Image (spheres, rainbow, N blue to C red):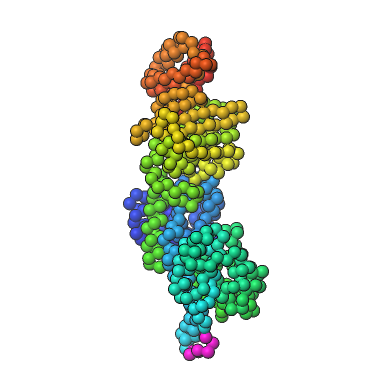
Amino acid sequence: MKILVTEKIAKCGIELLRKDFEVDERTDLTPEALLECIGEYDALIVRSATKVTAEVIEKGVNLKVIGRAGTGVDNIDVETATRKGIIVVNTPESNNISTAEHTIALMLALARNIPQAYTALKSGKWIRSKFKGVELYNKTVVILGLGRIGSNVATRLKALGMNVMGYDPYITDERFEKLGVKRLNSIEEVMRVADFITIHLPKTDETVGMIGEKELAMAKPNLRIINCARGGLVDEEVLYNALKSGRIAGAAIDVFEKEPKEVPGGADFSHKLLELENVIFTPHLGASTEEAQENVGLEIAKQVSEALKGNIVNAVNLHGLHVRNIHALSPFLKLAEIMGRLYYRAEKLPVQKVEIIYSGDIAKQETKIITLSYLSGLLEPVIEERINFVNVEMLIKDRGIEVIESIRSEVDHYTNLITVKVTNSKKQVTFAGTVFGKDEIRIVNFGGYEVDFEPTPYMLVIQNYDRPGVIGKIGTILGNENVNIETMRVSQNRKEGRALMVLNVDQEVSPQALKQIEMLDNVLRVSFIKL
Ligand SMILES: NC(=O)C1=CN([C@@H]2O[C@H](COP(=O)(O)OP(=O)(O)OC[C@H]3O[C@@H](n4cnc5c(N)ncnc54)[C@H](O)[C@@H]3O)[C@@H](O)[C@H]2O)C=CC1
Ligand SMILES: O=C(O)C(=O)COP(=O)(O)O
């Protein structure tokens, strides 16, 4: 398998990938060149400068994984990747300390005019009066977004004696208390109290332009803003005007709305904000430390490698899947997938609702992934595109299928049992399965009949009136076709006088033979199941 790396990542990461894969490092690719070559690759690794657009993903016909060597995935069209079943992985734990430290560095540099003073001195001018700064001590700083980086910034700013407050509606009061940060409940409140604001939000529809004209109009004149998160979270035009007119005191900016990709000798860059004396800048250096890049490079290599090998990783688009012991679950994943495939092999009507009930030991495990496995199996016979844990929920939703998952701790005969009730426009069809011992998979209910069979690659499921002679005639038809019956189980429904036969056979059964069986007296339905 082939991996394309379009931005510089640590050597240790590249070396790890090369153990199992072919790796092309092509940091010079233009967007057009990327579109031309992406079709050859199974995985793509980027940092923040490569735009992984819907077009790149469409052309990436072999892509299975997109690795973001870093945190923010706003340069990747995650929705399109998800629809295509492409796993998106990132390394959010690996560069947060570096970014928090860069934030502190920028905040101190801004407060003390260090870059401006340095530039003056470098040009031969000894100026002190112009560069009088302010202390951080006792000032109120508001952290927007108390996630990984925001909370690391909080502990560091407390050590500097600042009055630390935070705005993050998605974080619990307990977390605020633990960090010793005072909770603010609205952006208006933030603007009224802050001497400093430091931004650590993801770039989403909700956060873009979070600080705009209305907000800056409420700010104290001594406000200084630090943005080490993403360009555009503070409206750049509004910020420019507020800084130029002296409405606020200063800004330190590591990130811009439009950033170029570095080229040898440096990429050309110009921006209105660069004209102002009360703004300091770095070219997106938050994660650029030796340590962070080692961590990020190695971590992304591990994640991409695992994902390419088909193992579950903590991906951006594997929503809520945090599977601790995937190996213990693997027989259940297989069972669920097979149970999923049974429905459309036995029934024709489209599914409207799926109810999955986990009972016994399995109910104590992380069942969400088992449900996804079931749903992948369910859609597999009716969808041509790739289905996997990444896109199955989206595909199920597109088809309007309702999914209900429930858990029961009590069990009757089995230590663990997965029961699925599938509803279509006419009826509800039940299937159930279990795992004996370590990995012996059994289907124990098929369409309401209590059975006990091991799913094998070729199976014949026949529903008939429970009369003598039927089994013999079926045996003869299969014998004439040279089909060997490996095992046969019969389950009777005495009340209705019907029976269900499951035959594990050694090969495919021809449509003609299936027709002959169907035509036999007392045979109600025949399904050939190929797993
Ligand atoms: N400058 C650089 O080189 C780097 C920048 N970053 C950027 O830093 C930012 C933060 O990264 P992390 O701390 O890892 O993210 P995170 O996901 O751990 O934290 C983000 C926090 O923002 C909060 N949040 C989300 N929407 C919000 C809203 N509308 N209002 C208030 N709070 C909201 C979330 O609840 C969360 O606690 C990201 O934009 C990331 O891309 C990350 C690494 C390096
Ligand atoms: O990890 C992030 O979100 C960053 O912004 C770091 O970007 P970079 O990998 O240095 O281009």
| Secondary structure that dominates the magenta span | loop
Residue, far top: 469
Q: How many marks?
A: 0
Q: Residue at x 41, y 51 (%)?
A: 304
* Residue 265 placement (x, y as % from top left): 45, 71
Q: Is residue 529 above or below residue 364?
A: above
Residue situated in front as seen by the camera: 418 or 313: 418
* Residue 216 placement (x, y as % from top left): 63, 72
Part of the protein shown in magenta: 125-132
Residue situated in front as seen by the camera: 511 or 236: 236
Residue situated in front as seen by the camera: 47 or 394: 394
Quarter residue 333 falls in: top left
Residue 102 in view (yes/no): no
* Residue 279 placement (x, y as % from top left): 55, 77
Residue situated in front as seen by the camera: 365 or 516: 365
Q: Is residue 67 above or below residue 144?
A: above
Q: Residue at x 37, y 31 (%)?
A: 436
Q: Residue at x 47, y 26 (%)?
A: 445
Residue 362 in view (yes/no): yes
Residue 212 placement, left or right of 196: right
Residue, far left: 19
Q: Residue at x 56, y 80 (%)?
A: 277
Quarter residue 293 falls in: bottom left
Residue, far front: 410
* Residue 197 placement (x, y as % from top left): 55, 71
| Quadrant that contains the C terminus | top left
Residue 1 part of the magenta segment: no
Residue 130 part of the magenta segment: yes
